[in-house]
Amino acid sequence: MSKPSLPQGTRDFNAATVQKRQFIFKTIQSVFETYGFQPLETPAMENLETLMGKYGEEGDKLIFKILNNGLDNPQKKEQTLEGVEKLFAGKNSTAITERALRYDLTIPFARYVAMNHGSLNLPFKRYQIQPVWRADRPQKGRYREFYQCDADVVGSESLLNEVDLVAVYLTAFQKLNLPVEVKINNRKILLALAQICGGEDKLIDLTIAIDKLDKIGWDKVKEELDKKNFSEAQQKIIQTYLTIEGNNTEKLKQLTILLDNNEMGLKGIEEINFVLDYHIQTGMSKHLVADFTLARGLNYYTGIIFEVKAVEAEMGSIGGGGRYNDLTSLFGVPNIAGVGISFGVDRIYDVMEEKNLFPTTIEQTTQVLFFNLGEQEAKAAYLQMMSLRDKKIACEIYPEKSKFDKQFKYAEKKGIPNVIIMGTEELAKNECTVKNIITGKQTTVSLSDLSNFEF
RNA sequence: GAGGGCGUAGCUCAGUAGGUUAGAGCGACAGUUUGUGGAUCUGUAGGUCGUGGGUUCGAGACCCAUCGUUCUCCCCA
């Protein structure tokens, strides 16, 4: 028998880790609810067709596909072999796989909205906290199974939603005590830049090149632009665009000049201004940074886009989102606009752990351990324990009659602060001994008073 | 998809230019202590050196393959 192991990129979570993760989940969830979002859960698997083509070419490759059952059925051998042929031709085959694990929460949500739009009360605000799976190669801050916490609003084009979602981000991270910066940009601005530099069809090439700036530097970006046939004049504009600096107001002013009254661009700038202006009022604008190099890969975004970065941490983005004006049309229901954000809990956990930001109080364990000193003693102790449990005090009894040494060590390792000793001596007097193993203080308590004892 | 690092006891690692019975610390277990733990001391258990080939008189060490893991790039949370 080989050693047991875990699939690549997946993890087990021990008690301490689960409690810390729960802390993050609960914090985010409570913020979502405070802002009027309601929960939704969708299945771990979707029809492959629902997911394919929604995340770009790269994204499609990272979808975990589920092998169909019954492929060994001899009667279907022909179909199966044909399916395999299709796979080798680079196509998907429903004969081999027709289901896949969810890749994010946004597309399943869009699918849900498309299926239920008749009965939804628009604008519809939902949040969703579930794991997603990606067949990516694991590395730091990157797993094959990880949680996302999404909040989306559909059926409203108002920028007030963007304003609100920024507030959700900043409120949640403030509660988590994790300093962050929310970067904001607008796909309309990127589109405007593309229009100025050779046409809208250049948008994708442009965003890919722009996105790489902080990683590879301008010279390499220029090389990419050369390859994609951007002219010198166009490159000049792009370079100016990328080197815009200053505070948000200054940056937007410079951008306005650069984009030279491009209608789309002005619209984009106006939208960012709207959001910034609202948050000057709330005092949150100091955590908001207009960043025109922000592009975001998911190609369904059409308006404002966000990305959250932990301040002073070696970690990719810990959240992202944006506006998608026609996501449900992919599922045959046009004209439902939406905007949403996502929290990457696993990365948030990693950053908080690295920076030691978890409150010490969240690791909870048993409060009282009853020693087991024999059959009669254990039976008497059990009764006392049940009355403490009624008072919501977490207790347990050591299941075997063992030496003190062993029972003490168990309590110590599990971090149980109190032990109760009920042996023959104590029972004879209807008492028990309560010992705090941290302070070493020992108290004799009569059994009738035990349920009122302050541990 | 491309490229690098690492796989030796439950854990963290050592193992010198290939040489006999592969080591340490921590942990575990037992005793010192029939009902008062954390300390000390003593003792015990635990490894087909990831797996499979190859080179060699001889491989934990060298070579090849394979699996696992980790990191970087691509891309992303």
Image (cartoon, coloured by chain):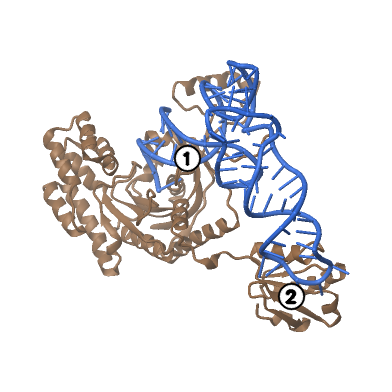
In the picture, measured across the screen, residue B28 lies left or right of residue A233, that is right
Rendered-image quadrant of the C terminus of chain A: bottom right
Q: Nearer the viewer, residue A415 or A127?
A: A415
Q: Nearer the viewer, residue A364 or A268?
A: A364
Q: Residue at x 19, y 31 (%)?
A: A226
The chain letter corresponding to blue is B
The chain under label 1 reads: A
Q: Residue at x 14, y 52 (%)?
A: A254
Within the image, what quadrant is residue A273 found in?
Answer: bottom left
The chain letter corresponding to brown is A
Q: Residue at x 20, y 52 (%)?
A: A267
Q: Nearer the viewer, residue A210 or A113?
A: A210
Per the image, label 2 sits on a secondary structure element best described as: helix
List x then y, in percent, for residue B38. 67, 64
| Mark 1 neighbour density, 10 Å: few (under 14) some (14–19) many (20 or more) | some
List x then y, in percent, for residue A182. 32, 56
Determine the CA span between mark 2 and mark 1. Answer: 49 Å
Q: Is residue A194 above or below residue A304?
A: above
Q: Nearer the viewer, residue A173 or A271?
A: A173
List x then y, in percent, for residue A156. 34, 56
> Can residue A11 be seen in this snapshot?
no
Q: Residue at x 61, y 26 (%)?
A: A71
Q: Is residue A143 above or below residue A371?
A: above
The chain under label 2 reads: A
Per the image, label 1 sits on a secondary structure element best described as: loop
| Mark 2 neighbour density, 10 Å: few (under 14) some (14–19) many (20 or more) | few
Q: Earlier in the sequence, mark 2 or mark 1?
A: 1
Does the CB distance between marks 2 and 1 fall below 8 Å?
Answer: no
**Which label was assigned to residue A138?**
1
Q: Is residue A307 above or below residue A404?
A: above
**Which label was assigned to residue A387?**
2
In the picture, measured across the screen, residue A416 lies left or right of residue A53, that is right
